[in-house]
Image (cartoon, helix red, strand yellow):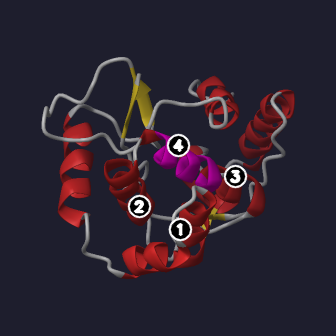
Amino acid sequence: MSGEPGLGYRKLPSKGLTEWHRYKQIKFNGSEDKMQKYTTLMNTYGQQVGIDFDFHGTVANTFDAHRLIQHYQEELGAEVADEIVNSLYTQYFTQRAHPSAPETLVKAATAAGVDKAKAEAFVSGESEGMQETKMLLREQANNGIDSVSTFSSAPSSSASATVISTSPSLKTKPFVAPLRHTSAPVE
């Protein structure tokens, strides 16, 4: 299995919106009832795998997170990329961390064993890896994928491209599993 990139709501501002607001407005047409059902369902699934979801963090454009994952996957391998993804998921889903804030990205890279100075240099150098990441995201958009990292059993169709994230490991599977349950609309 290989991970494919996806940005979800591509038009989200870098500054972001609260997750509660985004889901309520965008996903549930402002319905407080549907939002409450969704969070109850997600918390139930999360608790089954040891995750205490927090729905009051910030949702924002995650391009810089994808750029970070792509860079370190190419430079240091899939295991490091997987550790970065795990840290990003933990910070975002349970600690209200902004998904593309420089401090979130540096924390994720260092949690994966990347030297802090190198991580800070990469995160602050906004153009490094930008074109490659954009190419991979466009490829996935052309394949109809418009979601957070999508996992498939087939490699990327572009032979020269490295995929942005790894297959869900034992560490990231707990975060991915509850999300798969919510593909059906909440009624």
Main SS of the magenta part reads helix
Q: Secondary structure at mark 3?
A: helix
Q: Is the residue 134 above or below the residue 1 in the image?
A: below
Which mark identifies residue 68?
A: 2
Q: Secondary structure at mark 2?
A: helix
Q: Is the residue 50 above or below the residue 119 in the image?
A: above
Query: Could you tell me the amino acid type at mark 3?
Result: Thr
Contact? badges 1 and 2 (CB < 8 Å): yes
* Label 4: how many Cα within 10 Å (few below 14, some 14–19, many 20+): many
Total number of numbered discs in the rendering: 4
Q: Is the residue 73 above or below the residue 117 in the image?
A: above
Who is closer to the viewer here, 53 or 69?
A: 69
Q: How far apart are the alpha carbons under marks 4 and 1? A: 14 Å
Marks 4 and 2, the one that precedes in the sequence:
2
Residue at the image point whose x is 50% and y is 68% from the top: 100
Give how far across and how far down residue 92 sits, in percent.
66, 57
Q: Which residues are magenta?
A: 79-88
Residue 82 in magenta stretch = yes
Residue 92 vs residue 77: left or right? right
Identify the image quadrant of residue 38.
Answer: top right
* Label 3: how many Cα within 10 Å (few below 14, some 14–19, many 20+): many
Residue at the image point whose x is 69% and y is 52% from the top: 90
Q: Which residue is mark 4?
A: 82
Who is closer to the viewer here, 78 or 95?
A: 78
